[in-house]
Amino acid sequence: MRDFIYVSSALLSILLIVVGMLWYSKETKKQNSKPNLVVISLWTLIAIINTVTYHLLVLDYFKSSLLFIGTAVNVYVLIVIIVHKNYILLKRDILIVIAGSVFIILLLLFTNLKEVHVTMQILNTIVYIPLIWGVYDGKGKEPFGPWMIISIATIFNLITVLSHYSDYWSLIQPLRSLFLQAIVLSLIKFREFKTVSFWGCFFIDI
């Protein structure tokens, strides 16, 4: 039974992350989403490093599958954003990321594999700041539906890790992602409450 949960949750997480990210790119093409170029670009770079370090830590392709697929669709979304020239680029975002990146680079010079993975989580969290800030003050535009699908994919990824739990290092990535995704979803709904009716906030426009 545990093996069934392990395999099925991994496959569901892969399917959902692909659906969520493709939906996100579709919203970008339709101009319903205004992604932050700094955030998406750094996410793509961090995703590559994060995927490699995570896989080297857990040595399990099923546990790493969401990250491998997520990295591939991250690259695809970045290409779509650049091709369609639909993004925001704010000076404050660049300053936030530069400050955080310098701090992380200094840490990376004196760390081992596990510490590298942890510092990638810190950097990934820092990269979320411009996105969260943009959604909060209305300068950024993020679609609720794709973010919800991506969050569900992360939940299934967490189930995959828990079904074959080895150590707490393998939990850092999915727990961090789920926490930050929940903040983004909450802020998107917070913005919608200010612009539409109460019941309108509980329906997703596909």
Image: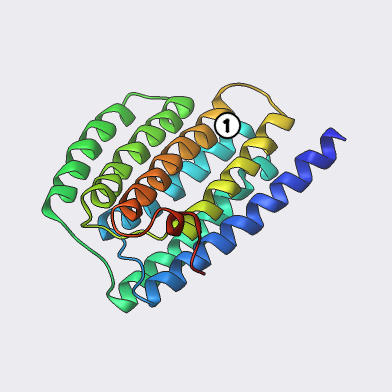
Give the colour scheme of this rendering.
Answer: rainbow
| Frontmost residue, 148 versus 163 | 148
Q: Which residue sits at x=24%, y=51%?
A: 134
- Please, what is the three-letter code of the amino acid marked with disc 1? Leu
Write down the quadrant of residue 89 in the picture.
bottom left
**Residue 190 falls left or right of residue 146:** left
- Point out the residue furthest to the left here: 91
**Residue 66 pos. (x, y %):** 60, 49
Q: Quadrant of the N terminus?
A: top right
**Residue 10 pos. (x, y %):** 70, 46
Write down the quadrant of residue 63 in the picture.
top right
| Frontmost residue, 72 versus 183 | 183
Q: Which residue sits at x=48%, y=26%?
A: 114
| Frontmost residue, 134 versus 95 | 134
Q: How many marks?
A: 1
Mark 1 sits on what residue? 57
Does residue 186 lie above or below 72 as drawn?
above
Q: Secondary structure at mark 1?
A: helix
Q: Which residue sits at x=29%, y=38%?
A: 126
- Point out the residue furthest to the top here: 167
Write down the quadrant of residue 9 in the picture.
top right
Q: Which residue sits at x=76%, y=39%?
A: 6
**Residue 104 falls left or right of residue 152:** left
**Residue 33 pos. (x, y %):** 35, 66
